[in-house]
Each structure stands twice: as C-alpha cells, then as structure tokens.
Image: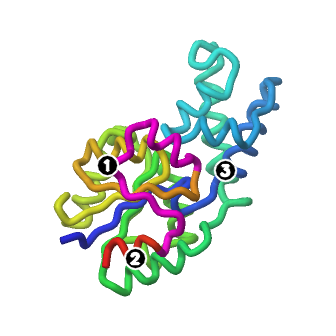
Amino acid sequence: MINTVIFDMDGTLLNTIEDLTDSVNYILDMYNMPQRTVEEVMHFVGSGSGKLIERAIEGGRENKLFDRILEDYEKYYCDHCNIKTGPYKHIPELLKELKARGYKLAIVSNKPMDAVKELAEKYFNEYVDTAIGVTKDLKRKPAPDECLEAMRELGVQKEECIYVGDSEIDHMTAQNTGLPCISCLWGFRTKEELLKAGAGSNTFVQDPLEILDILS
C-alpha cells in the first residue's frame, strides 16, 4: 500500500526556471560568454549543476575555466535561488491534502543541498518530512541513492512509495529505484519528450490535484 510520495523539485513542485536562467546568464556574462534563453536552460537542467554548466558554456567540460565557472555558478545560484521561484498552481493544496490523508512526503533533487533545504523550508516546511539534494556521499539522480536515503530517513520500503517528477531523469530515477512513476506535464518536458525517453508506462497528469485521484 502506498503511504509515501517522493517528489522531484524543479519543474515538479517549484517553477525555478527563471532563477536558474538568470543565474546561468549572470555567470556567462561574468566570463564574457553568450547568453542562454529560458528554453535552452529548461533543456539543460535535470542532471545537476555540473551538467547544466557543461551544456551552457563554450567548450563544456573541456573549457579550462569549467571548475571555476561551476563554483561561481553554484555560489551565485544558492544566494539567488528564490527571486522569481514559486510553487506551481495547486501544489500547496496537493501537499496539504496528502499530509491530511497521512502520507509521508519527501523531496529529492539534483540541486545543491543548500538550495534544496532553503526552498523546501520556505515553501513546504509544514508538509514535507525530508528534502535531499546533492552531496558528496550520494550519487545524483538517475541513480537511486537519493530516493533510497529518503526512504531510509522515513522508515519506509519501496513497496510503500511512488515517485513524482517531470523529466526523463525522473523517469529513470523511478525505474532505477523500482518505484512506480507519475509524470507531470506542467514542468520542463513535454509528453512527447517523455514518451521518446521511454516513459510510456508512467501515469501522466496535467494538474497536481489529479494525483489525489490516483492515490485514492
């Protein structure tokens, strides 16, 4: 019986794309590199800040300044991760109702841990039981490590959990963890992109409140 819901953060609970884009472009400007559009950054995100910067800068990881640019980006973003960010429509209502029904709730994200903790505390502190970001001890998604750590902290087994995310990384994370997956279509990927990534067996939702019907 499902009693735990594990959520992705970016593109699932929070619309973070403007702050991500602004932070990327601030750093690109620092290094006199071409700016990126919201659409470009939307397709760069999902695999952590290292992959984001690799995709955004000239030369990728072969750029001799890569490590410095990444460090500058992570510091800047952590300080500016909540300028334009906010929950998607009906997310607060969804979490409130899930909590009222007795579900345990977790967030797992490929964002830096400091940013995950700050955003989770600001927006979801009364609902979410644990929020996990990238650390040196946990492999980032799509590896199962972050989900397994959330399950360990909550004292639940995989048979009790379902995963909710918006990207192909989330689909693969759920698969690698052995969890059923709900793919939300208000985030950073289209249904066509998710189907192309092999997510055809997932349950697709257009509005967060549809998740209540799936779990009822």
- Gap between marks 1 and 3 measured at Cα: 23 Å
Residue located beneath label 3 in the image:
17
Residue appearing at x 70%, y 53% in the figure: 80
**Magenta residues (range):** 188-209
Q: Position of residue 174 (x, y in %)?
A: 31, 49
- Gap between marks 1 and 2 measured at Cα: 19 Å
Amino acid, disc 3:
Ile
Does label 1 or label 2 sit earlier along the sequence?
A: 1
> Which numbered tag is attached to residue 30?
none
Left or right: residue 111 versus residue 155 is: right
Left or right: residue 10 versus residue 215 is: right
Front residue of 77 and 47: 47
Q: Position of residue 160 (x, y in %)?
A: 20, 66
Q: Nearer the viewer, mark 1 or mark 2?
A: 2
> Which numbered tag is attached to residue 174?
1
Does label 1 or label 3 sit earlier along the sequence?
A: 3
